[in-house]
Amino acid sequence: MRRISSGGIFEAKAGYCRAVVAGGFVHVAGTTAQGEDIPDDVVGQCRAVLEAIGAALAEAGTGFEDVVRVTYMLPDRTEFEACWPLLAETFGANPPAATMIECGLIDPKYRIEIEVTALAR
């Protein structure tokens, strides 16, 4: 088993890591936009989240083409459709199984949180 940390602000506080490689899979934790310049809009945050997830997947030796499952969590489900073009571009010809959940997130400034599971290479 291998653990991958991104240094995100909640990792140390909540006791988790960005990703765990185990059992032939890469399990990436729910990820929100991070840093000092978090975009206000859902598409900007979605882009930032995908960049963070992409970095974790790359560190694990895999990529978006190997994602088999994705969960999207948004406090306002009506904002999800604005992300669809970016998600379609990210997953391309290899779309994963997906679920979207409308729920509260850890801080009201967050518009989207994404969690993925990918095949390990």
Image (spheres, rainbow, N blue to C red):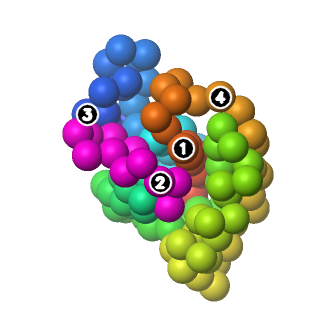
Give the mark, 2 or 3, whose residue is nearer the N terminus. 3
The CA span between labels 3 and 1 is 21 Å
Q: Position of residue 26 (x, y in %)?
A: 51, 49
Magenta-highlighted stretch: main secondary structure? loop
The local secondary structure at tag 4 comes to: loop
Give the mark, 4 or 3, whose residue is nearer the N terminus. 3
Amino acid type assigned to the residue bearing label 1 in the image: Arg
The local secondary structure at tag 3 comes to: loop
Tag of residue 7 = 3
Residue on which the image places disc 1: 111
Farthest residue to the bottom: give it: 93
The local secondary structure at tag 2 comes to: loop
The CA span between labels 2 and 3 is 23 Å
The CA span between labels 1 and 4 is 9 Å
The CA span between labels 4 and 3 is 23 Å
Residue on which the image places disc 2: 41
- Assess whether mark 4 and mark 2 are in contact (beta carbons under 8 angstroms): no
Residue 60 visible in this rendered orientation of the protein: no
Identity of the residue drawn at 30% across and 27% down? 9
Give the mark, 2 or 1, whose residue is nearer the N terminus. 2
Q: Position of residue 83 (x, y in %)?
A: 59, 65
Give the mark, 1 or 4, whose residue is nearer the N terminus. 4
> How many neighbours does mark 1 have within 10 angstroms: few (below 14), some (14-19), or many (20 or more)?
many
